Image: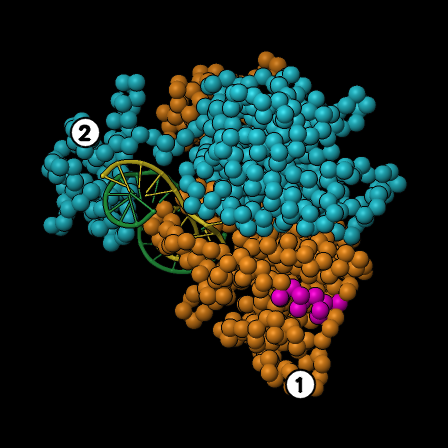
Chain colours: A cyan, B orange, C yellow, D green
DNA sequence: GGAAACAGTGAATCATCAC
DNA sequence: GGTGATGATTCACTGTTTC
């Protein structure tokens, strides 16, 4: 079983990271307060939705809809819900690294309050993501549109926060080579994935699908990162994090949920290193200065470079700069200058001639990089 | 031209319904205050989004993105935006019939504040509706998910309000006999529909597509109803209302927008009774990306794919890319790479083993497509 | 005349590192 | 923390120009 920490026990622990890969039993804010500053990479939160259900809802055949009417989803007023939201978001911000991000999922019952509170607390929204359900529950009364989606907010802890993880290139490559959109399509959690008790009833009323968490985690974390879930429930976040080679920590009050989540996570087999390698793009590659091409004799001082259509040309100088029309500068500055632009990527703009063919100097940079890789 | 009422003139009018089918020139709240209590059936509001843009944004080709930086979208703080939102929503509630409903559209920049304010003012949210754009602007820097949707909130003026119009059966009939969902797919407004000035430039930076308004109006109004738009802009609400046999009233401050909207509405020919059936949205062949196969557990990270003759092989990674010989990429890129080609259709090139038989992964895509049948 | 290449654009909170 | 240099980065569609 995944280890479970009663909050009092965690507070007594001498190891400041004893909570990694475990479930903390206790109140969400109190448990968060027991964790160190800036210690987790990503937070995924599925807070109570504050569903304001009137009476019982019946299907057309008079069967009762098993609504979420648990006590933990009841709040006296919007003010009470806002105060609760504020408290756990503030506690989350303290434990989140400045380079970390937070995800919160909700429905129209609560997501507007969560979003406004995030903004009030100076979180910076990066995206709102729509989870479109392939198989949502119908609207039985025919008085509204079928509520076929939920909303996630993805935010960084500060408007100026930089350096958050976003595996753009991997997401794009996995999506037929077009960038991933803000609307995602997944089935709801059902079938074998849905945790059921001995009585055959679902263990948790709002268990999220693993595929949803997998995309969240693959998009915004690196292998080895710590993912915190302050409303752990059935432990989907922990199960997916473990499978994907990330660490997790869950906070949960109800012993039944803790028992189910703990057993579930224990059964998860993590993927291997090869499968977990994330495709990274140019941004992650080591920098190579233009000078390195001269030093490696891949280009020579005096050699002429042109753009792809040979409209502009420049001469390589021995110091690693270019010159054209009496002006000089780096490959980037001069590329911008000849085009009359503010900026230019000289690596893709300038080309050299290779046996009659014309190729970007970026190709030569790749040669350098592969030579460097061989030295490791 | 559709008639235009300077606010002062409207106040002097002896006819309490002189404003029907006209544009009121003036401030939103002041103009609303000049209308009678409980006099309109539906409100559609497209308020300023308070975008809070930083510096200029350039496309990869260095061209400048024509951002929405108009003065009317600038607010000093969230508090100022909230006060503004509160004021116009309160004014709207007074003129709205108890059986009426209100729609508000926004993006993540403002919609959470609008939604929370609606709830604070005791409006009752019926649905949040996601407008999925077929052709949204890309994320040029690759730092976020492509922002591909906007959100609408549909609400009644009171939790106990009954009797609002929802044309459930007509919507269902127009939607292949399944209930209309909360996620709608429409292209952004472009081409001939987009209003352009003499200079060829767009008249309004945020003109909404008529198809979106048509579904809103067909869903929540009856012929002859009055539809109010407190941020009239280019007059899409008025044009669609007139075409669909509804009355409209628009409120707008800027004379340029009023001139364009007035001429636009004048040119609209109302449909006859027979044609007034609900229009259905765009259907598109669903795009299925390789990661959908992993998410549906049809293939697994670590599994080996080969070409049809088993000359090449690659391993599936958890991020939805493939790896072979130390290199990684999308099914297409890696298929091309192993063959030494420039391009490759990974769907037909890569195969998986199924009980000894070898089948293209494209077969698995068909499985997903059949599961998604009925979804746009 | 038709096809293909080229150019333009849409509610966008859009970089990072070294000095 | 501010400044300057490096250099990474786009999808769907419309309309125009070129061959």
**Quadrant into which the N terminus of chain B falls:** bottom right
Q: Residue at x 73, y 25 (%)?
A: A256
**How packed is label 2: few (under 14 Cα within 10 Å), some, or many (20 or more)?**
few
User: Foreground: A276 or A119?
Assistant: A119
Chain of the residue where label 1 is placed in the rendered structure = B
Task: Judge whether residue B306 can be spotted in this image.
Answer: no
Q: Residue at x 51, y 45 (%)?
A: A123
Q: Position of residue A3 (x, y in %)?
A: 62, 19
Q: Position of residue A365 (x, y in %)?
A: 26, 31
Q: Which residues are magenta?
A: B87-97
- List the residue tagged with mark 2: A298
Q: On residue A249, which mark appears?
A: none
Chain of the residue where label 2 is placed in the rendered structure = A
Task: Judge whether residue B86 can be spotted in this image.
Answer: yes
- The answer to whether dots 1 and 2 both sit on one chain is no
Judge whether A345 appears above or below A364 on screen.
Answer: below
User: Foreground: A170 or A112?
Assistant: A112
Q: Nearer the viewer, mark 1 or mark 2?
A: 1
What main secondary structure does the magenta stretch of the protein show?
helix
**How packed is label 1: few (under 14 Cα within 10 Å), some, or many (20 or more)?**
few
User: Foreground: D19 or A341?
Assistant: A341
Judge whether B121 appears above or below B38 on screen.
Answer: above
Element on which disc 1 rests: loop
* Marks 1 and 2, how far apart at CA: 82 Å
Q: Position of residue B233 (x, y in %)?
A: 55, 67
Q: Check the image and name the residue furthest to the top.
A: B356
B304 in the magenta segment: no
Q: On residue B13, which mark appears?
A: 1
Q: Residue at x 49, y 66 (%)?
A: B72
Element on which disc 2 rests: loop
């Amino acid at each position: 079983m995944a280890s479970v920490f009663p909050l009092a026990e965690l507070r007594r622990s001498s190891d400041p990271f004893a909570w990694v890969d475990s479930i903390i039993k206790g109140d969400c804010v109190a448990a968060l307060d027991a964790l160190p500053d800036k210690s987790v990479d990503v937070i995924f939160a599925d807070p109570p939705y504050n569903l304001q259900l009137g009476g019982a809802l019946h299907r057309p055949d008079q069967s009762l809809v098993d609504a979420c009417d648990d006590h933990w989803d009841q709040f006296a007023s919007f003010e009470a819900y806002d105060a609760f939201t504020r408290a756990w978001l503030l506690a989350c911000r303290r434990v989140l690294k400045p380079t970390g991000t937070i995800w919160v999922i909700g429905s129209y019952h609560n997501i507007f309050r969560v979003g406004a509170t995030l903004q009030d607390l100076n979180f910076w929204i990066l995206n709102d993501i729509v989870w479109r359900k392939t198989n949502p529950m119908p609207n039985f009364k025919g008085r509204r549109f079928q509520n076929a989606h939920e909303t996630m907010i993805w935010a960084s802890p500060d408007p100026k926060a930089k350096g958050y993880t976003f595996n753009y290139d991997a997401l794009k490559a996995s999506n037929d080579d077009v960038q991933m959109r803000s609307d995602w399509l997944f089935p709801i959690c059902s079938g074998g994935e849905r945790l059921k008790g001995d009585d055959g009833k679902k263990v948790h009323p709002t268990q999220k699908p693993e595929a949803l968490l997998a995309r969240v985690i693959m998009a915004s974390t690196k292998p080895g990162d710590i993912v915190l879930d302050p409303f752990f429930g059935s432990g989907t976040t922990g199960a997916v994090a473990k499978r994907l080679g990330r660490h997790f920590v869950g906070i949960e009050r109800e012993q039944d949920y803790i028992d189910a989540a703990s057993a579930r996570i224990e059964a998860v087999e993590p993927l291997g290193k090869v499968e977990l390698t994330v495709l990274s793009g140019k941004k992650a590659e080591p920098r190579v200065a233009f000078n390195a091409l001269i030093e490696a004799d891949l280009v020579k001082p005096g050699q002429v470079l042109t753009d792809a259509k040979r409209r502009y040309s420049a001469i390589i100088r021995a110091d690693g700069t270019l010159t054209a029309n009496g002006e000089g500068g780096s490959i980037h500055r001069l590329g911008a200058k000849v085009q009359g632009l503010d900026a230019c990527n000289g690596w893709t703009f300038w080309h050299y001639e290779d046996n009659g063919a014309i190729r970007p100097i970026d190709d030569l940079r790749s040669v350098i990089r592969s030579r460097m890789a061989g030295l490791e």
